[in-house]
Amino acid sequence: MKFDDPSLAPLPAQSARSLAAEQNSTASFYGWRVVLVSALGLFWGIPIAVYSFSVFFKPLMQEFHAGRAAVSLGFTVQLFVGALSAAPTGWLIDRFGPRRVIMTGTATFGLILVANRLFSGSLTRLYVFYVLLGLSIHGVGPIPYGTVVSHWFDRIRGLALGVTMLGIGLGAVIMPTVAQTLIARFGWNTAYSILGASVLLICWPTVACFLKEKPEDLGLVGDGATVATSLPHNKGARHGFTAREAWRSRDFWIMVCAFILVSASVQGCVVHMAAMLSDKGLSPHSAALGSSLIGAAALIGRAGTGYLLDRFLASRLSAIFFGGSALRVALLWLANSQLMLGGAFLVGLGLGAEVDIIAYITSRYFGLLDFGKVYSSALAAFALAGALGPLVMGAGFDRTGSYRDPLILFFVAAAIAAALMTRLGPYRFGAQQAVPNQPILQASVAE
């Protein structure tokens, strides 16, 4: 027999309760499996291309007999190309689905790393290598993985995104050490090749086996969804804005302007942290401790922010965090060397919080209909500003011989960002009420 209306088929009361309980347990379990495999995918992506670059820096200088500026240009080009490719990645995600983008991007990223010897003949070829890494980086980045996790979780989406982004934080701590060990033993070419092989042989198969794009792919209902919002005829009211509607909204531009201001402020401080601490009289070892504090605090910031996002309005929480960014900059500007270490820790907390906030706040104000396009465009602005922040910091120091002027500028920028976030209203697409998950039954059932 066929049901004209795609609703729940009648079941005996006891059977319905048992099936609902089983479904709820399965959905929760597999949703967290998706989070863990997403964190694994992020671990093998951005940390290799971005956070490990510093350990390749001197070997590349020696290989090409080039100065620091010439080698740094490759990294800068990678960041800018990556920022510019964020929006096209969002379009591909919404067109073909995040899983296809992830699988293709992961394979491409690994192959580029393995084939790095083809680009080692000259500095020009090296720049091409980093351009290709920049083009592929978002296939293994937070845009597709954040899209997947946002579909699996609703009520505790903030925590799920925070745990997912821990993959980047752990990678930022572990991958540079692994890369340094490989370089010391085999050289920089082979180190990149081994890291690429690990992406292809460990990361790609694991993600292929366990990453499911949506809970509906397994006949499940995502965490926090109700029966009504899980049925096809009710999805339209819940999905969200189109990308064009989001881009035309006042809230989107408030968010983007705030993200630009705070990203430039935080990233400028992160890149120049060791130099600022050295200028205050700290030893090279103590100055390096400041950079380590940033990494450790970023890990705390990611998980902690996710937990808080599920309990407080994201715009107000963002205003507090961005206000904290202004305080962090002020500490670096005004404090002595010991208090500056505290400022370094606070900078790390902000760095860990920001990417989580962008993904979460996008889903709550604009929904999941064109999440890939909207999130990627906001993240692109964030990344471009992050690439410009260190340049502003360095230019200010070169002009005046001090970091004072750029720090004052970044203090004002972070304060404005905090004020902007207070202008956002309530969510348009808030979390569903905590109700037991129900099974999704087929619209047609054989009698």
Image (cartoon, rainbow, N blue to C red):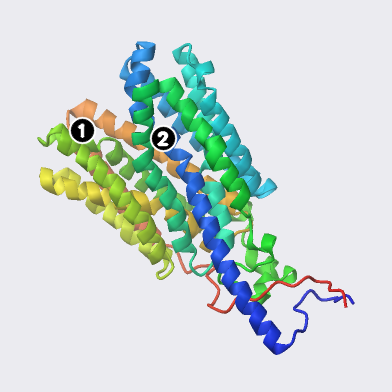
Circle 2 Cα neighbour tier, 10 Å, few/some/many (<14 / 14–19 / ≥20): some
Q: Are marks 2 and 1 in contact (CB under 8 Å)?
A: no
Depth check, front residue: 65 or 403: 65
Depth check, front residue: 110 or 351: 110
Write down the quadrant of residue 398 in the picture: top left
Is disc 2 placed on a helix, strand or loop?
A: helix
Give me the residue at 21% from left, 42% from top. 290
| Side of 32 relative to 342 (left or right) | right
| Side of 269 relative to 21 (left or right) | left
| Residue under pointer 2 | 50
The extreme front residue here reads 185
Write down the quadrant of residue 172 in the picture: top left
Q: Nearer the viewer, mark 2 or mark 1?
A: 2
- For the residues labelled 2 and 1, the Cα–Cα distance comes to 19 Å
| Residue under pointer 1 | 275
Residue type beneath disc 2: Val
The quarter of the rendered structure image containing the N terminus is bottom right
Work out whether residue 153 can be spotted. Answer: no
Write down the quadrant of residue 226 in the picture: bottom right
Q: Earlier in the sequence, mark 2 or mark 1?
A: 2
x, y percent for residue 113: 51, 28
The extreme bottom residue here reads 13
x, y percent for residue 371: 59, 54
Give me the residue at 74% from left, 68% from top. 232
Depth check, front residue: 104 or 381: 104
| Side of 437 relative to 265 (left or right) | right
Residue type beneath disc 1: Ala
